[in-house]
Image (cartoon, rainbow, N blue to C red):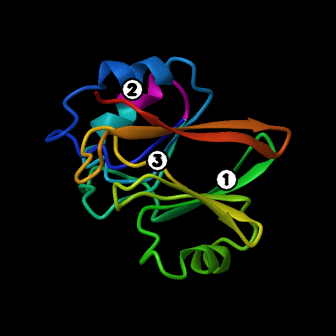
Amino acid sequence: MVLSDTHAPRRWRSCPPRVAEHLRGADAILHAGDVCVASVLDELSAYAPVHAVKGNNDGPDVTAPETLELTLDGLRIGMIHDSGPAGGRLARMRRRFPEADLVVFGHSHIPLDETGGGLRIFNPGSPTDRRRQPQGTLGLLSIEHGRLREARIVPVTP
């Protein structure tokens, strides 16, 4: 499961019920930054192992790296909060994470699933701060034997 930009405690006082529904079945949780307070990561870790990067609004108690590279079931994943401007994003993420199959990012609150040049980039949006988006969202990934079988953006607000 993929989250970003939860913005606690202003937007996330505790895990929203529709987010918790998806967390219950998660094998791992990727958080692409702006949790804002470390207690969110503690709360998420009760559901599944959490891998997180630091966002521009994260407080000093959030001890996460600026970028992260990990492998889940053989799939190579890069994580960063702010991927920069939309123009040239795929090429920029390929340079930043040359070995990655997938790059997860946040910051914009705009859900995105794009593929090009052998790389897939994925922004789950925000489940709690939709800004100009019609709904709050999160991301679901299905990874099997080193392949991304499915990536979905899922609405979690009415």
Percent across and percent down for residue 43 are 36, 27
Is residue 79 inside the magenta stretch?
Answer: no
What element does badge 1 sit on?
A: strand
- Provide the residue designation for mark 2: 19
Q: Residues within 10 Å of mark 1 (few under 14, many from 20)?
A: few
Depth order, front residue of 157/143: 157
Percent across and percent down for residue 51 are 53, 45
Q: CA distance from mark 3 to mark 2?
A: 12 Å
Height in image: 146 above or below 95? Answer: above
**Upstream in sequence: badge 3 or badge 1:** 1
Question: Residue farthest to the left?
Answer: 10
Q: Residue at x 27, y 50 (%)?
A: 61
Horizontal relation, residue 90 to residue 138: left or right: right
Q: Which mark is residue 124?
A: 3
Q: Residues within 10 Å of mark 2 (few under 14, many from 20)?
A: many
Q: Which residues are magenta?
A: 43-49
**Upstream in sequence: badge 3 or badge 2:** 2
Height in image: 128 above or below 36? Answer: above
Placement of the C terminus among the 4 image quadrants: top left
| Residue type highlighted by circle 2 | Val
Percent across and percent down for residue 101 are 74, 59
What element does badge 2 sit on?
A: helix
Where, by quadrant of the figure, is residue 129 drawn?
A: top left
| Residue type highlighted by circle 1 | Leu
- Provide the residue designation for mark 1: 70
Q: CA distance from mark 2 to mark 1?
A: 24 Å
